[in-house]
Amino acid sequence: MIVAWVWLGLAIATEIVGTLQLRTLANGWHVLPAVIVVVSYSASFLLMIPALRTLNVGVSYAIWSGVGTGAIATIGAIWFGDRLNAVAVVGLVLIVAGVVAVTLSGGTSHG
């Protein structure tokens, strides 16, 4: 079961890398960031496969997307100066709370 979480963590990390490179592309088209986006997203999906051998798809996807969203919002605020007002911060806290609730629900592995 721990190995599945490692795979999921790697899938999340590569998705974050790809999304950050999308932000780089917003400033102008460059081949290297575009390649990184394609490779990162492809790797993210491929890394989900071994995680899904143990973890439920709904829970895995909720964690993957929730953690990714929270991380991207936080990194965007730090690295790119994206503004997060109080409503956005509350929303991020709710996403984290939802991910924790889903994880603690016991629905994380095939039964």
Image (cartoon, rainbow, N blue to C red):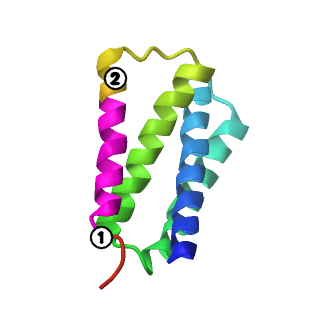
Q: Which stretch is magenta?
A: 91-107
**Place of residue 95 in the rendered image (x, y in percent of width and height, measured from the top left):** 33, 41
* Magenta highlight: main SS: helix
- Say which of 100 and 37 sits in front: 100
**Place of residue 51 in the rendered image (x, y in percent of width and height, measured from the top left):** 49, 72
Specify the farthest residue to the right. 32
State the image quarter where residue 54 is shown. bottom left
> Is residue 71 rendered to the left or right of residue 91?
right
Amino acid type at circle 2 is Ala
Membership of 97 in magenta stretch: yes
Amino acid type at circle 1 is Gly
Residue at numbered disc 1: 106
SS at mark 1? loop
Judge whether 35 appears above or below 72 on screen: below
**Place of residue 65 in the rendered image (x, y in percent of width and height, measured from the top left):** 39, 49
State the image quarter where residue 28 is shown. top right
